Amino acid sequence: MSKLYLVPDRKDMERMCTLAAEYGCAFEYNDFFWPEVMEDSQKKKEIIEDFRACKESFINKCYGDENANDQFAPNLFENDTMHGAFLDVTIHSDDPLIRDASLLRVRQSMEIAKNMGLKGVVFHTGRLAGFRAAGYLRNWRDRNEAFFREIACKYPSQQIYMENMFDEAPDILAGLAEKMWDVKNFGVCLDYAHAMLSKCLGREWIETLAPYIRHIHINDNDLQNDLHLAVGSGTLDWQEFDSLTREYRVEAPVLVEVNGYEAQRESLQYMKKHGIYPMEREREK
């Protein structure tokens, strides 16, 4: 299983593949959540084939045509994940038109993942941050549970990861994850950078969600804005992140969610130098 993920850039795939190979990374695709892509079957096909061709070309270049099939599984995407639809997606809406459109976008995301043979799909909570009316929170939990139970059953080969967006605390997401505990292909994606924009400490986020975390997103920011900076170039305390993930025995792969080759390399180098999870610490070697 890959411990690290990168966001691939279709315009720079040779360097992306080289960097991924160097650090043992898989890819998480951010190309399919745009409405204009989801509505255009030809565009989706072109993007998928573009990625497939780039990966095949890199493998053949590194290992040769004759040895490529012996070194790699036929499905070039089996360890990869993707970000599902999240723009305006509101599963829990009381408005049936909004709810139906949201359900459609999630199903479209899962179909893309199934057709590509991806490992999993990330979705956002979609909650109104800071709005904690009891009825609203109950609707959010119950409607998400019912829907994602159905989706998890229909797509058993894909993992479903629910990511905190600008949630003010981890308790509501933890409540859903607890209700979904018996669903083996459902879990939490902890976005640590998003969590650090809340008023809750990192310890509270990781301690609360640790039993349910199956995927992690990291990038850096100034503790005020969601900037997606290279890891180590902002204000976040990465030694604390590392200590907490190890203290609470979190075992989940990590997406370095920054864009572009340079920021990705900078992030990976920083993580390796400082032994930031899931990189090995120097004393553990």
Image (cartoon, grey):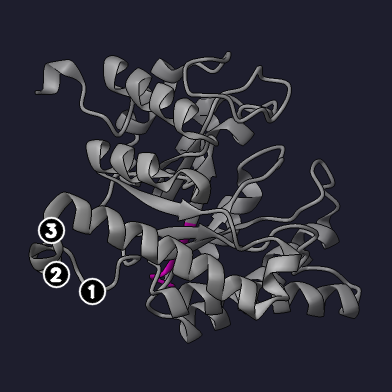
Provide residue 181's location: percent of width, then percent of height. Answer: 45, 65
Residue for point 8% across, 67% down: 66
Q: Residues within 10 Å of mark 2 (few under 14, many from 20)?
A: some
For label 1, the residue is 74
**Front tag of 2 and 3:** 3
Give left or right: position of 267 versus 230.
Answer: left
Q: Percent from the top left, x then y, of residue 47? A: 54, 65
Q: Quadrant of residue 98?
A: bottom right
* Frontmost residue, 255 versus 179: 255
Image quarter (top left, top right, bottom left or bottom right) of the C terminus: top left
Give, as a single range, the part of the protein colored magenta: 183-187
Dividing the picture into quarters, in which one does residue 281 lie? top left
Q: Which mark is residue 69?
A: 2
Q: Amino acid at mark 1?
A: Pro
First in residue order: circle 3 vs circle 1: 3
In the rendered structure, which amino acid carries the disc numbered 3?
A: Gly
Spatial separation of the CA atoms under disc 1 and disc 2: 7 Å
Residue, disc 3: 64
Q: Is residue 149 magenta?
A: no
Whether residue 249 can be seen here: no
